[in-house]
Structure formats: C-alpha cells, structure tokens
Amino acid sequence: MGLNVGKMTSDLRRMTVTELRRKYAEVHGEQTRSYHKEYLIRRIAWRMQAVEEGDLAERTRRIRERALDIANDADLRMRAPAPGMSTATKPTVHRVEKQLDVPIDDRLPMPGALLTRKYKGRTSEVRVLPNGFDYEGTIYRSLSAVARAVTGAHWNGYRFFGIHEPKQEKATVTKQ
C-alpha cells in the first residue's frame, strides 16, 4: 500500500518545531539549522515520499550534484552591499568619452557648476557639463537619469536637485 501524503502532512502539521526537527534528523540522517515549520514539513514529506516511492533517477542526481558544486564554488553575494560600502568594493566605473547632444535648459546653471543633494544621509555631487552631467565618473544625458542613479527610482531631476523655473519679469501696463 502506498504512502498517504495528505494524512502524513496533516500529522506533521500537528507537531511542534522541536518535534519536526527531531523527525527531520531521523528521516534525513542529519541535523537541520532551520526552525521554519513549513520548510521542515515540506522537506520531511518529500524525503518520506522519496524513500517510499523511489528517489531521484541517477542522471538527475548527478545533474543536481553538479549544480550544487558550481553554486558552492561561485562567489555569490548573499546580501545587498551596505549603504556606505568602501570604495575598494565599489564596481569599476568606466568614463564615457562620447559627446552627448543634450539640449540646453534655461534652468541649468553654467557648465562647470556643481549641484549637490543630500539623500538618505549621503551627499551626491553632480557637475554640469556643456553636454550632460557628470556623476561619479559617469556621464548622464539628463538630471532625471542622475536622480534615478542616486535613488533607484524615477524623479524629476530638476525637482530632485531643487532647481526651479527662472523668475520671469512681470509685464507692466502703463496708461498713456
């Protein structure tokens, strides 16, 4: 008679995490570091079913072992880099030597001016160029592209850097 997976999982769900960890060690032959109840239930049920109905085919097992070997040999990043990571660990930035055609906007200061903005505790500096914007060694076509590089989200570049419309002179009407 085959294994009743539904009954087995309902029995496992009634167990405490400590009991599940003990059952995991019994079924797998090794201890687990996990305290996640759903994970333990799934792994125990999978192993019991594999023992009852037959494990993975030999070819599948070899492929799985090879994939695990490759994953173990790879230098994988397990976490996102810390906000203030050192310059030694920053990715290399290549300078763009291509001339960009960027339309001139009256709101922009003269080329060479430095725009600064403090965002999430970090000060970002952008140098206005005749045909673009230099931010950390990379040339961007627009301030919005720079703002996206700084924040990771879409921003109006002029608003992000606090650049407002130039004040227009009011027309005066005189009576003659």
Image: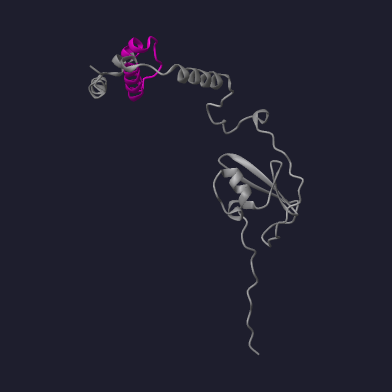
In this view, the residue in front, 144 or 3, is 3
Q: Is residue 102 left or right of residue 144?
A: right
Q: Does the stretch in magenta take in 31?
A: yes
Q: Is residue 32 left or right of residue 170?
A: left
Q: Does the stretch in magenta take in 34?
A: yes
Residue at image position (73%, 56%) is: 101
Q: How is the image coloured?
A: one colour
Residue at image position (42%, 18%) is: 57
Q: Quadrant of residue 42?
A: top left
* x, y percent for residue 14: 23, 21
Residue at image position (53%, 28%) is: 79
Q: Quadrant of the N terminus?
A: top left
* x, y percent for residue 110: 74, 56
Extent of the magenta region: 22-50
Q: Is residue 155 left or right of residue 106?
A: left
Magenta stretch: dominant secondary structure: helix
Work out whether 91 lies above or below 98: above
Residue at image position (54%, 31%) is: 80
